[in-house]
Amino acid sequence: MATVVRKIDQLRESIAPFMAFFSGPFSRLNGNPDVANFAVGNPQDFPMPAYVDSLREHLEPRRRDWFAYKDSEPKSQVTVARGLSKRTGMEWDPADVAMTNGGFAALAVAMRALVEPGDEVIFLSPPWFFYEFMILAADAVPVRLHLAPPAFEPDLEAIAAAITPRTRAIIFNSPHNPSGRVYPLETLQALGRTLTEASERIGHPVFLVSDEPYNRIIFDGGTFHSPAEAYPHTVITYSYGKQLLAPGQRIGYLTVPPTMPDREAFRETVFVSQLATGYAFPNALLQHAIEDLEKLSIDIAAMQRRRDRLVTALREIGYQTTMPEGSFYVMARAPIADDVAFTDLLAKQRVLVLPGSVVEVPGWFRISLTATDEMVERGIPGFAAAYAEASA
């Protein structure tokens, strides 16, 4: 019992900043129609009509087993493999696609499939809230390496130095949440060489878990490249919740490239891990609709215009900001060192943002571009008023 309590305390501590925000300012202001809500990547408008139409069309049962137990449906695997082949230039095998109930589940399955108790998993900070949490939940040891703002460039020498014989994996996120960086192929190739050399040095492969839920959210006509194009021991995790802006409808996948050695044996490991993770498969309806969902996307051009409007306005006020190349997010430096205190000033102006300390970037805050255009226009005076108050 004492061991269980210690583990729960560890898990609780790893998400304490997240819980403090979401049980405090977020719970008070989220859903208030007078608040300009930039806190998280939730939809602030109605879902895409085409998305709703697809779900409605596939809701009507075609067979008696329409809503029976589902694992990875062959149609889903083929649809995903076809899209991956088109985007990466590699011939993806549908058998290597494991459908999951969202990207969160895909990451949980990856951790269960790859690591054993005591293994080390490197993650890059600022991270998604739950990377450390999920490493700990798999009884592994989290190893944090920092990406310095505002460039958020990975330090390959630091990564190489952090790899030990106990290192099993590194979690890599591009487009990066929260910075919006989309790492070019050259960076991924250099990372692949670093991991290859380290794997040879320690005598076993270091897996690269490529968390890619934003890989369709790319701005300025840019191109996304997956680390799987540069490094064979890559495990991709994906969520359709971002491209569809429907995070509550849980469907995603875990997959490996055709270049990965021993991938046939890895398939069974993943399947068993999905069962052990609590039947981590998506529901039947979303798999029936997968061919439609693969083709749908939120309006990226509209989100890019929102980014440009907001970043320009914030910089004119005096904020230092990132200019995201992808993802949903803009990072801005608070005019005072205490980002939590500053987000409280913004909340007084009815502007809800995420404190940077929640994503391990103290002194900054994160803005979600999933807010509506009307919220952007309503929020800009609030950003200006809070900046003036803090500066005074």
Image: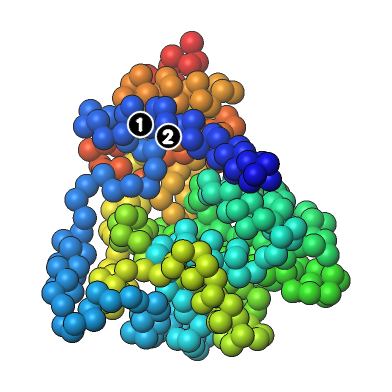
Q: Mark 1 points at which residue?
A: 27
Labelled pair 1, 2 in contact (Cβ < 8 Å): yes
Query: In the rendering, at what x and y percent does residue 180 appear?
Result: 49, 51
Query: In the rendering, at what x and y percent does residue 242 appear?
Result: 37, 58
Front in this rendered view, residue 97 or 300: 97
- Image quadrant assignment for residue 383: top left
Callout 2: few (<14), some (14-19), or many (20+) C-alpha neighbours within 10 Å? some
Q: In this view, does 75 lie to the left or right of 15?
A: left
Q: In this view, does 61 lie to the left or right of 311?
A: left
* Amino acid at the residue labelled 1: Ser
Query: In the rendering, at what x and y percent does residue 51 appear?
Result: 21, 64
Q: Name the residue under label 2.
A: 22
- Image quadrant assignment for residue 294: bottom left
Q: Is residue 263 visible?
A: yes
Label 1, label 2: how many angstroms apart (C-alpha)?
6 Å
Relative height, residue 301 to residue 83 (above, below): above
Query: In the rendering, at what x and y percent does residue 140 appear?
Result: 69, 56
At horizontal 65% and vertical 44% (from top left) the residue drawn is: 1
* Amino acid at the residue labelled 2: Phe
At horizontal 16% and vertical 77% (from top left) the residue drawn is: 61
